[in-house]
Image: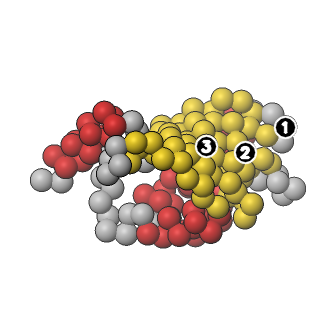
Amino acid sequence: MQIENEDINTVINNYVNSIYYHDSTMVYKTTDSSLQKSGHYWSKKRQEWSYDNMNFEQLFHTASTYNKKDWIPQWAPIEIEVYDIREKVASAKVKAIWGFDYILFSKNTDGRWLMDKILWQSYNEKEAKEYFLKLKECNQ
C-alpha cells in the first residue's frame, strides 16, 4: 500500500502544482477527461457562499491562467491526507491556496491513479481575510 499512497500523493502534487506553476500539461497526468469538480466558495463581493461546477476543460484552463502573474507565494500549502485506498478507488483531502479539495480517485486500466471527482470549499470569510493579509504582507 505504500506505493499506492506515494502514487496518490504524486497525483495530488501534480494537480496542485499544475495550478501553482500554470502548467496545464500536468492536468493530463492527474485526471481523466470525465473529471467532475464542484464546490462552494466565499464571494467577498457578494458576502455570501456560491456554488460552481468545473469540468476537465475548465480545470485545464484554470491551470493555464490562475497563477499566470506568479502571485502565489513559495509558502503556499500543499497539505495532503490520504484517507483510504482500495484496489480500484481511493480518497484524499488536500489543502491548497484556494481552500480544501476532497478527492475521489479511480485506478484506470493501465494501473494509474487518476482524480475522478473533486468536491471543494474555499476558505471561509475569516480564513480568507487572514490568509490574504499574510499574502499581502509577504509581497511588500
Q: Is residue 91 left or right of residue 43?
A: right
Q: Marks 3 and 2, Cα distance to the nearest angstrom?
A: 12 Å
Quadrant hosting residue 105: top right
Residue type for callout 1:
Glu
Q: Where residue 87 is drawn, which disc sits there?
A: 1
Badge 3 vs badge 1, beta-carbon distance below 8 Å: no
Residue type for callout 2:
Phe
Residue at x 33% of width, y 55% of height = 72
Residue at x 57% of width, y 32% of height = 81
Residue at x 18% of width, y 54% of height = 139
Mark 2 surroundings within 10 Å by alpha-carbon count, few (fewer than 14), some (14 through 19), many (20 or more): many
Q: In this view, does 84 lie to the left or right of 51?
A: right
Q: Quadrant of the N terminus?
A: top right
* Residue 65 placement (x, y as % from top left): 43, 69
Q: Mark 2 points at which residue?
A: 105
Q: Marks 3 and 1, Cα distance to the nearest angstrom?
A: 22 Å
Q: Of callouts 3 and 1, which one flags the residue occurring earlier in the amino acid sequence?
A: 1
Residue at x 66% of width, y 29% of height = 83
Q: Of callouts 1 and 2, which one flags the residue occurring earlier in the amino acid sequence?
A: 1
Nearest the viewer among 126 and 4 is 126
* Residue 29 placement (x, y as % from top left): 65, 61
Q: Where residue 124 is drawn, which disc sits there?
A: none
Residue type for callout 3:
Leu
Mark 3 surroundings within 10 Å by alpha-carbon count, few (fewer than 14), some (14 through 19), many (20 or more): some
Q: For marks 3 and 1, give the one nearer the viewer.
A: 3
